[in-house]
Image (cartoon, grey):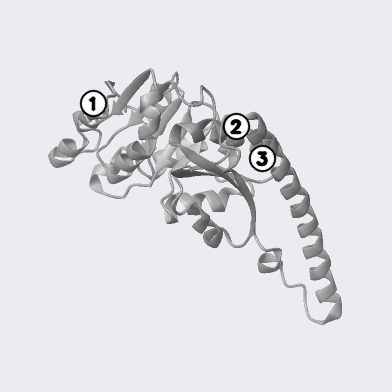
């Protein structure tokens, strides 16, 4: 029986292929079962009121039926893609499961509790498409580490870690810990931009370097050029790696390095390395 769980968010269609392949490849590294979840909001919760009387009720009912019919089609597609990926992949087929959930994104996000990773497509991570609210709720409200596959090897062979000493950055490093053992190269990205003396002590890259060394992982450190956009600078610094690990939406003084605007830049990028983020 697997010790961990990896949740992969599905919507039906081609956007499911990359997260499914990534989740399947990551499952053995994390000793995890793979759980696919197709999330749809209940159309009865968001259909606009069309007016009083039987005519209005009929319009709403017809619209709801049409939405549910499309959702049924998308769910069947997602389930088929999930099954095909599981059959051809390296993950445990017996422990894999697929589930359809009809609920609000915030309620559906409870599925992310006790999972090791949530894997989602880049569009959803960037705030677009039907899974955007679900993925955001999992990351922010449920504090589930989020893995967004883009380019590069999975499991990653080269990893960059954006480090500022914040609890968010530390949680991201903890979440990525099994991946460090598999990597050929690990680089700590750091910057002292907007940090005072006490913040600099917390954000010293040696704190993370020593932690990684205790886990048998050797790494190098690299200071990021912060003359322009911090998020863009990190993406550029991590441009040749397979995975960028970073904290998300920090709010303490020490978290200026990984702050809201930077998080949106990292999640919104369609190119560049895959990202693993934690809040």
The residue to which callout 3 is attached is 82
**Numbered disc 2: secondary structure:** helix
Q: Residues within 10 Å of mark 1 (few under 14, many from 20)?
A: few
Q: Residue at x 49, y 43 (%)?
A: 1
- Quarter-wise, where is residue 202 in the image? top left
- Quarter-wise, where is residue 175 in the image? top left
The residue to which callout 1 is attached is 213
**Numbered disc 1: secondary structure:** helix
The residue to which callout 2 is attached is 21
How far apart are labels 2 and 3 at the CA level? 9 Å
Precedes in sequence: disc 1 or disc 2: 2
- Residue placed furthest toward the front: 1
How far apart are labels 1 and 2 at the CA level? 30 Å
Q: Residue at x 53, y 32 (%)?
A: 149
Vertical placement of residue 125 versus 210, above or below: below
Vertical placement of residue 43 versus 187, above or below: below
Q: Is residue 157 visible?
A: yes
The picture places residue 207, in percent across and down from the top left corner, at: 20, 33
Left or right position of 130 against 173: right
Q: Nearer the viewer, residue 211 or 127?
A: 211
Left or right position of 253 against 272: left
Label placed on residue 144: none
């Amino acid at each position: 029986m697997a010790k961990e769980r990896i949740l992969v968010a599905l919507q039906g269609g081609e956007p499911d292929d990359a997260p499914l392949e990534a989740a399947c490849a990551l499952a053995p590294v994390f000793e995890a079962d793979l759980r696919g979840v197709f999330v749809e909001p209940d159309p009865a919760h968001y259909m606009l009121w069309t007016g009083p009387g039987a005519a209005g009720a009929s319009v709403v009912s017809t619209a709801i039926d049409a939405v549910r019919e499309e959702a049924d089609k998308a769910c069947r597609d997602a389930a088929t893609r999930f099954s095909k990926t599981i059959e051809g992949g390296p993950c445990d087929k017996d422990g894999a499961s697929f589930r359809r959930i009809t609920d609000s994104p915030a309620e559906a996000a409870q599925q992310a509790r006790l999972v090791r990773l949530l894997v989602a497509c880049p569009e959803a991570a960037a705030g677009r498409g039907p899974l955007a609210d679900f993925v955001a709720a999992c990351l922010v409200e449920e504090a589930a580490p989020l893995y967004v596959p883009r380019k590069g090897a999975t499991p990653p062979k080269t990893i960059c870690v954006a480090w500022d000493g914040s609890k968010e950055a530390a949680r991201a490093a903890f979440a990525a810990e099994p991946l460090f053992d598999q990597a050929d190269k690990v680089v700590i990205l750091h910057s002292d931009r907007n940090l005072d003396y006490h913040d600099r002590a917390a954000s010293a890259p040696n704190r993370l370097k020593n932690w990684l060394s205790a886990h048998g992982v050797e790494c190098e450190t690299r200071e990021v050029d912060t003359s322009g956009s911090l998020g863009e600078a990190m993406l550029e610094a991590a441009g040749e790696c397979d995975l960028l690990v970073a904290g998300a939406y920090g709010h303490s003084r020490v978290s200026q390095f990984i702050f809201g605007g930077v998080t949106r830049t990292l999640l919104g990028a369609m190119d560049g390395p895959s990202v693993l983020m934690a809040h």
